[in-house]
Amino acid sequence: MASFASFVEISRHNLIPLSVTSLCGCPCRLLSNKTLIPTRRTPKLKLNFVFHGSKSVFRVRPTTIYVNRRLITAVARAEPESIDESNAEEEVDQGAVLPTTKDSFSELQHKSSQLRKRIVFGLGIGISVGGAVLAGGWVFTVALAAAVFLGAREYFELVRSRGITAGMTPPPRYVSRVCSVICAFMPILTLYFGNIDISVTSAAFVVATALLMQRGNPRFAQLSSTMFGLFYCGYLPCFWVKLRCGLAAPALNTRIGAGWPFLLGGQAHWTVGLVATLISFSSIIAADTYAFLGGKAIGKTPLTNISPKKTWEGAIVGLGGCIATSVVLSKIFSWPASLVSAIAFGFLNFFGSVFGDLTESMIKRDAGVKDSGSLIPGHGGILDRVDSYIFTGALAYSFVKILLPLYGV
């Protein structure tokens, strides 16, 4: 195909040489005495394009088009004879690098902002939770009930997500809301009655009846996901109330209790339940922290397909950090008395935290989401923060209530 050049005729007068590269390439040498800069925005111009090649010259029929001022200026300043194709390509390549560098800088800023939010809100949550644990009683129970309600709402929203509903029928929305309220009342009933087995069974029966009597075709997936929600979000967290508020025997050997202010309860405030809850919470935090740092530093072997980022190396480091924290705090609080009991308590806390973390990761993976919600900036949803505590409460309570008295350690 023969090469061709082109001219642009503006207002049927001055012909401005124009080539294809002059429109596409960015580096054009400026003409000092032939630059066309409109003094005001011209809404319409009549342009005649004339192409000439080796055989014929023809004139394109005038057409009224809208032209941007910057386009007119670029066309008028173009001098195709002085354009070096290699330089143009080099400049274009350099221009393509700039957005990439800018995107990398923006991503770095975003990660830095997320880290600051994570630290600030993490410290705020830690201080608030620590205060609620020390206060105990209704303060601790109401705070737990609020977290349970928010976590139940997130769970039933995950069940209704597109990823899970593709393979099952979710429960009706009104059932999900009722179940969230029932879950929130379970910790309060546990504190008031001390045992909620009958209440949980009655609530499950009522919810199951509502699902079976609904219009349309009831599905077993609706029943199973709802019953698991009551158990996962409502019943299991109640063991923390049993541990913190139910085990009221004083920890007589605790040194901190001896100097505790009388107005705040004195030594009697430091019960076995309070000490066990503090050690358990601290061990879970240590397990998550050490597992994260160990996985980042030396993690190579994937732990499970449910959560590909978790590694065996990180899990081992997390287990060591969890047991070490349990042993150190047992020396500070003088509970439990033996080293074997402290190690066993740390191991149970680690196992419960990992199991709870993987369970929530499995739910999120089926739902096709990264976080359970966006309630806590930098952390995700409430389930993302409490997943390690859901199963651990039952294990910690069973250890203190059954295993320690059974073996006398």
Image (cartoon, grey):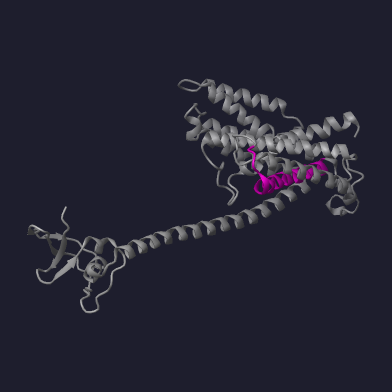
Q: Nearer the viewer, residue 346 or 385?
A: 346
Rendered location of residue 266, percent (x, y): 88, 50
Q: Residue at x 56, y 43 (%)?
A: 371
Q: Residue at x 71, y 48 (%)?
A: 129
Image quarter hosting the C terminus: top right
- In this rendering, is residue 222 above or below 289? above
- In this rendering, is residue 130 above or below 246? below
Q: Is residue 163 left or right of residue 39?
A: right
Rendered location of residue 359, percent (x, y): 63, 34
Q: Is residue 261 visible?
A: yes
Dominant secondary structure of the residues highlighted in magenta in the image: helix
Q: Residue at x 74, y 38 (%)?
A: 350
Q: Which residues are magenta?
A: 273-302
Q: Is residue 188 visible?
A: no
| Residue sticking out furthest to the bottom | 33
Rendered location of residue 357, percent (x, y): 65, 38
Q: Nearer the viewer, residue 161 or 346?
A: 346
Quadrant in which residue 119 is drawn: bottom right
23 inside magenta stretch: no
Q: Is residue 360 left or right of residue 243?
A: left
Q: Is residue 186 left or right of residue 408?
A: left
Quadrant in which residue 14 is drawn: bottom left
291 inside magenta stretch: yes
Rendered location of residue 317, percent (x, y): 73, 44
Quadrant in which residue 263 is drawn: bottom right
- In this rendering, is residue 43 above or below 362? below
